[in-house]
Structures are given as C-alpha cells and as structure tokens.
Amino acid sequence: MNKKKCLIINIVLLLWFLLDMIGLKIGNQYLVVQAWKEDGIFFLVYFIIIVVFLFKEKIGKYALTIFLFLWLFIQVMSHEIYTITGGGLNKIDYFKETIKLFPSKSVYIPDLYHLILHVLILVALIFTVTYIFKKRITK
C-alpha cells in the first residue's frame, strides 16, 4: 500500500461525502438530501485531515485513522445497529424518499447512499491502517 492509493480512496470518500453537502435527487427519489447544517463541520474536519495527511504525513496518518474509525463507529451506531437489532421506525420514515436497495417497512435498512458510504469508510480505514503498518515494516 502506498500513500497515493491511500489518498485516492480518501478523496473518493470525500467526494461521495460531498454529495451529502449538496444533496442529489434522481427522478422522484433522493440519493441523499442536503445535510450541510448537520454534517458540514464533519465534512470540513475530514477535508482538513486529508490535507494534513498530504503535507504532514507523520501526524496526518494517525489523525486520519482515528477520524475514519470514529466515523465508522458513528455510522454503525446510527444506521447498522437498527438493521441488526430491529426497530428504527423513525429512521424508516426519515429516509422514506431515498433510494433503497432493500426496501422495508418494518426494519430500517440503510439507503443506497449510506450503504456505499459505509463501504467507502471501511475501505478507506483498511487502506490507511495498511499504509501505516507497511510504512512501519519498511523502516
């Protein structure tokens, strides 16, 4: 794993997350509604951490790893936990106009945007951790 691959996946994730800032409607359904008020600071922090990783790798790689881990944890607790444990009826209603791969009226299953977001966060975290370990081994 090299720094370039690690940056690429994190930039892809940042661009996907940008959709959350601007919102995207396809036909009569939303891929994601605009959530600048809710997630704007989080987006800016992620952007800054990527820039720090680019120019100050020594601290940036650890900041990026911690951020990605916490973000994944927050996403699991906010979305996936309802799929695993059941419930989430308020979430079903909140996300009713979004594109879903697995529609359900009884159990909350994350919409397409969030499924892809979760995969991208996980892949970015794996790439970043792998990069850190490979860099340590080659020293």
Image: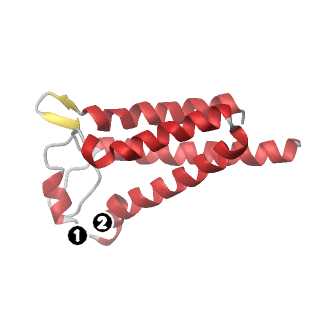
For the point 16% across and 54% down, the residue is: 94
Q: Which mark is residue 51?
A: none
Q: What amino acid type is highlighted by mark number 1?
A: Gly
Give whichever of discs 2 and 1 has the lower sequence position. 2
Q: Quadrant of the N terminus?
A: top right
Q: Which mark is residue 87?
A: 1
x, y percentage for residue 40? 34, 42
Mark 2–mark 1 distance (CA, rounded to whole Å): 6 Å
Q: Quadrant of the C terminus?
A: top right
- Above or below for 1 versus 125: above
Q: In the image, is 19 to the left or to the right of 118?
A: left
| Residue on which disc 2 sits | 82
Q: In the image, is 92 to the left or to the right of 49?
A: left
For the point 27% across and 56% down, the residue is: 109
Q: Secondary structure at mark 1?
A: loop
Q: How many marks?
A: 2
x, y percentage for residue 55? 66, 31
* Residue 50: quadrant of the picture: top right
Mark 2: few/some/many CA within 10 Å (<14, 14-19, 20+): some
x, y percentage for residue 46? 48, 42
x, y percentage for residue 97? 13, 43
Q: Secondary structure at mark 2?
A: helix
User: Going by the picture, which residue comes out furthest to the right?
Assistant: 139
For the point 19% across and 28% down, the residue is: 26
Check if mark 2's residue and mark 1's residue have beta carbons within 8 Å: yes
* Residue 138: quadrant of the picture: top right
Mark 1: few/some/many CA within 10 Å (<14, 14-19, 20+): some
User: Going by the picture, which residue comes out furthest to the left?
Assistant: 28
- Above or below for 25 versus 132: above
Q: What amino acid type is highlighted by mark number 2?
A: Tyr
For the point 55% across and 41% down, the residue is: 49
